[in-house]
């Protein structure tokens, strides 16, 4: 038996749906379903990504974990701490990182089911995990563990704890709300829109007087401040590096540039949700009146869901108008946790059990087909290539290590070059080096001239990347004589060969 606390009927398809609809068994049945979801996407991720190496943004967090501080150039520090803890338990391997990613989004689906269950029950609640399982944020994009996907479970936990704190005076929920909100903020500053949603909801909720007279808001605020304060001090001391990074990377060049990003932000967000929306309409057949009553409910019971769902989606548009910031739909990965509640909570929406079974069957078949197709995906990636030289990182690490051993007997502590290439490459180097990404003091504040002189550095560039080669030459000119070599790397997978790619590697040994 998979789980001892599940009865055998839950292990059949019909029994699974019945268990999800049962008020006494829905939590443990949802757990079983989420475990099956995690297993399927873990298998897909391991196979489909087997012809490429680790994504640079994921590898970057490993580099950050090797340089523990209270903040980093692009994001708050929490995920660096999470990754450091994770790889203290698991080996430093691609599959372990995929497991972390799958664990995060699977936890997000379970917590989102708990959250939506505050407004849904029975068949409506049973539909939640299946509707979320066809949203790419929880599947394909969720396999990339980054600041966006990590917010999925953190936002769901924050909203669930917050709603429970509104309902009960128990201090535990208020403390949990503060901790979860702080964790979200320490993952990505985008979570400021989550905080705005919480604040707005407390002002318009029917229980606001009792809530603000209780200790709950003060406990939540106090816990949040205590957790975030060290990072806030770091921001002040270092002149807000992540905010400067956003300002240089996401500022709109023109009104047309901004409008283009706004269209992508709006259409992209609901485009990713399109399959779930289509399935809900096709299977549950809501009337126009039901749809109208679903998405902007202002009656007291559903008003919090409306505010908590729409505020993080719409408020960024208002802010971006004043700051001239381009928006990106992928930033809304955590914002769809409440979508099933918005779709189904109206009493005018009728969800028969047979419709839930059909939904479950469609999602199950679709998932199985995707898993079966994973070797084909890996083959397409091998032959078609993947961005940022992600197919060559492991081979580049081996070649860099060979060149370094010809130069020095010291451990390889620094690798320089383009951010995507050196981040992924450093993940596979046995000495666990840090990076000098883009030869940038901003991106790699730990790569000081003193450290480069003390530890030495290996630099790697694609042979056709003139900008990188210029940075490499400048670095070589600043150090003692080392080696420079050009290598051609070819990725192989199941006896098949990908495209060959040439790289230049230079090594500068430590100064004695």
Image: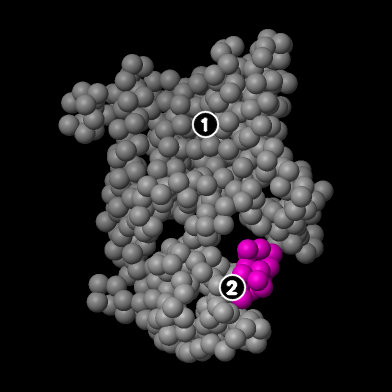
The image quarter in which residue 477 lies: bottom right
- Furthest residue in direction front, as rendered: 512
Residue at position x 46%, y 54% in the image: 144
Q: Is residue 290 above or below residue 166?
A: below
The label shown at residue 117 is none
Describe residue 78's horizontal placement relative to residue 89 as left or right.
right
| Res. 454 mark | 2
Residue 286 in sight from this viewpoint: no
Q: In which quarter of the view is residue 255 placed?
A: bottom right
- What's the residue at 21%, 23% (across, down)? 7
Image spot of residue 388 (x, y percent): 51, 71
Q: Viewed as shown, does residue 297 lie left or right of 154?
A: right
In the rendered structure, which disc, 2 or 1, sits on the residue that comes first in sequence?
1
Q: Nearer the viewer, residue 52 or 298?
A: 52
Residue 376: where, in percent of width, then height? 31, 65
> As displayed, is residue 300 above or below residue 455?
above
Q: Which residues are magenta?
A: 438-454
Can residue 452 be found in the magenta stretch?
Answer: yes
């Amino acid at each position: 038996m998979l789980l001892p606390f599940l009865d055998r009927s839950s292990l059949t398809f019909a029994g699974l749906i019945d268990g999800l609809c049962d008020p006494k068994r829905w939590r443990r049945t949802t757990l079983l379903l989420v475990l099956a979801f995690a297993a399927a996407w873990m298998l897909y991720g391991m196979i489909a990504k087997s012809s490429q190496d680790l994504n640079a943004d994921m590898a970057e967090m490993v580099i950050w974990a090797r340089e523990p501080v209270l903040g980093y150039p692009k994001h708050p520090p929490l995920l660096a701490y999470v990754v450091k803890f994770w790889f203290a338990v698991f080996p430093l391997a691609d599959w372990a990182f995929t497991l972390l990613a799958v664990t995060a989004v699977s936890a997000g689906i379970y917590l989102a089911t708990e959250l939506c269950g505050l407004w849904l029950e029975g068949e409506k609640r049973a539909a939640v995990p299946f509707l979320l399982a066809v949203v790419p944020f929880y599947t394909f994009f969720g396999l990339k563990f980054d600041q966006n996907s990590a917010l999925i479970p953190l936002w769901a936990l924050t909203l669930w704890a917050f709603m429970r704190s509104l309902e009960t005076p128990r201090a535990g929920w208020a403390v949990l709300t503060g901790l979860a909100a702080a964790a979200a903020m320490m993952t990505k500053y985008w979570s400021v829109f989550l905080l705005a949603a919480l604040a707005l909801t407390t002002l318009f909720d029917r229980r606001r007087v009792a809530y603000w007279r209780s200790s709950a808001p003060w406990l939540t605020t106090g816990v949040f401040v205590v957790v975030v304060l060290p990072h806030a001090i770091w921001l002040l001391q270092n002149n807000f590096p992540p905010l400067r990074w956003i300002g240089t990377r996401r500022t709109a060049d023109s009104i047309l540039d901004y409008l283009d990003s706004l269209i992508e932000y709006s259409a992209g967000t609901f485009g990713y949700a399109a399959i779930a929306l289509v399935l809900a309409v096709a299977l549950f057949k809501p009337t126009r009146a039901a749809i109208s009553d679903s998405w902007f409910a202002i009656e007291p019971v559903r008003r919090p869901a409306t505010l908590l769902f729409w505020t993080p989606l719409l408020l960024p548009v208002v802010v971006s108008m004043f700051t001239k910031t381009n928006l990106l739909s992928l930033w809304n990965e955590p914002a769809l946790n409440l979508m099933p509640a918005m779709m189904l909570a109206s009493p005018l929406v009728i969800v028969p059990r047979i419709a839930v079974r059909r939904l479950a069957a469609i999602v199950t078949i679709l998932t199985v087909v995707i898993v079966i197709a994973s070797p084909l995906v890996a083959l397409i990636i091998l032959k078609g290539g993947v961005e940022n030289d992600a197919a060559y990182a492991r081979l580049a690490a081996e070649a860099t290590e060979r060149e370094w051993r010809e130069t020095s007997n010291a451990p390889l502590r620094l690798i320089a070059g383009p951010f995507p290439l050196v981040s992924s490459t450093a993940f596979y180097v046995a000495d666990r080096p840090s990076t000098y990404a883009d030869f940038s003091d901003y991106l790699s504040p730990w790569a000081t001239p003193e450290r480069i002189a003390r530890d030495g550095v290996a630099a790697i560039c694609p042979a056709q990347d003139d900008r990188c080669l210029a940075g490499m030459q400048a670095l070589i000119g600043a150090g003692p004589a080392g080696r420079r070599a050009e290598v051609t790397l070819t990725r192989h997978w199941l006896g098949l060969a990908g495209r060959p790619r040439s790289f230049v590697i230079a090594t500068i040994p430590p100064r004695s």
